[in-house]
Image (cartoon, rainbow, N blue to C red):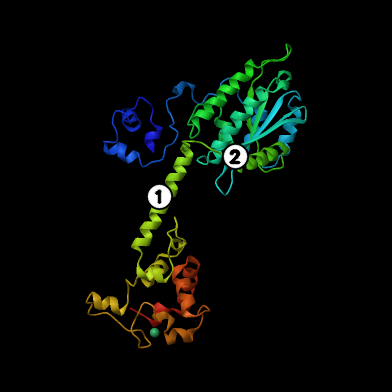
Amino acid sequence: MRTRKLDPYHPLYKRSHDRTTNPALSRLSRFLKKIPSSEKINPLLFPPWERGTTFNYSFDKDNLDFFDPSDSSGNKFQTFLNRVPKNDIQLYTDGSKNPEGGVGIGYVIYQIDRQVFRGSGPLCVHNVPYDAEVHAVLHGIRTATNLPTARFAKDLWVFTDNKELASKFYSMDNIRSSQKAHIEALEAAKMWKSRLRLPHIDVGQVKICWIPGHSGITGNEQADYEAKKGSFLSYHEDNPSHSFSSLEKWHSLKLLRTKEVWWKTHLHTNYTQLEINTIPAFPKELLLSRKALGRIISLRTGHGDFAAYHKRFGHTNSNENCLCGSSKTRLHLFFCRILRRRGYRPKGSINQLLPKLLGTPEGAILLTKWLEQTKFFEEICTR
Ligand SMILES: [Zn+2]
């Protein structure tokens, strides 16, 4: 995947992308063929001295307030909006991905407190919401520039609820996905200056601001609605390719699936009994104390202070019996009569208790409590 982020002058670029000169002969190109097609990010598109600049538009003090993360209400925005000249065009944009995977863009345009345009459309499914946000800004700016009423407006205000996009739009730094659409949107923003306008109207510029999402700002809500609508429209592309962020997502899903398959084939039989069939990224059992975790792992795997285990490894001086006289087995604690007399046993039959106590993090906590209260390993089933 990193070869998709190489600059065209990189020695590996040609070897990884030019398939005519080297038709799938090298190990590298054979391997790369397994990765679905995606956009290529050119990290050298802009020279370093142009990056991080905001060009001719910098946020003044008023606008910086938008970047205050503690303000999740739309109130501050309303106060600000009242100061925006009524002739100026306000563009609200949003992108959305529905649970079925469809991606949509939406934008709504206001001028003189009136909604003058609303648009929505679908995108290829190989996009993430961030890509949709970029495309929504691109289409929104193009539409606003071509509006007949654009000649009355000085500035075009773009309001997006994506903070990353708002802060990076004019800076050339680290475009992580949909680079082409981002560049086109910048071009479109330049075109705003050459629109048809009345003689007394200034050239103006495209200003992009972050606004809090889902905070009751009418324009934002409507753009959200349009984007959701767009995500359900049908979309067809002959050779669909992933955006870079979508490729990253594909990769992490693939990694997860591979892990799951590996887990299923290498699963210990005890684990099948206990119905432990997934590997979470961070098992909550790890939050238990080291001692409790050790007990649970030995109960799960059978590697521990059990008679069978001592026999297998030929231990001579080990205590193979519980205080009750029975031999120490992995599941003896469920049958030990001394432990039973001490009480505190969680409710349920053994068949229910087993997968619950040994197989789930919540059960592990219950089990630890039970064993601590009864001092099972300290007084009854000692080493
Ligand atoms: Zn016992």
Secondary structure beneath dot 1 equals helix
Residue 205 visible in image? yes
Q: Name the residue under label 1.
A: 255
Question: Does 71 sit above or below residue 364?
Answer: above
Residue drawn 75% across the image and 23% down it: 87
- In the rendered structure, find residue 92 and report the number of the disc placed on it: none
Residue 207 visible in image? no
Q: Where is residue 119 in the image (x, y as percent from the top left)?
A: 66, 34
Which quadrant of the figure contains the N terminus? top left
Residue drawn 59% across the image and 29% down it: 138
Q: Position of residue 288 (x, y in %)?
A: 45, 64
Seen from the viewer's position, the closer of residues 211 and 200 is 200
Q: Along the polypeptide, which appears first: circle 2 or circle 1?
A: 2
Amino acid at dot 2: Gly
Snapshot quadrant of residue 199: top right
Q: How many marks?
A: 2
Secondary structure beneath dot 2 equals strand
Residue drawn 60% across the image and 23% down it: 189
Seen from the viewer's position, the closer of residues 25 and 234 is 234
Residue 216 relative to residue 29: left or right: right
Q: Name the residue under label 2.
A: 104
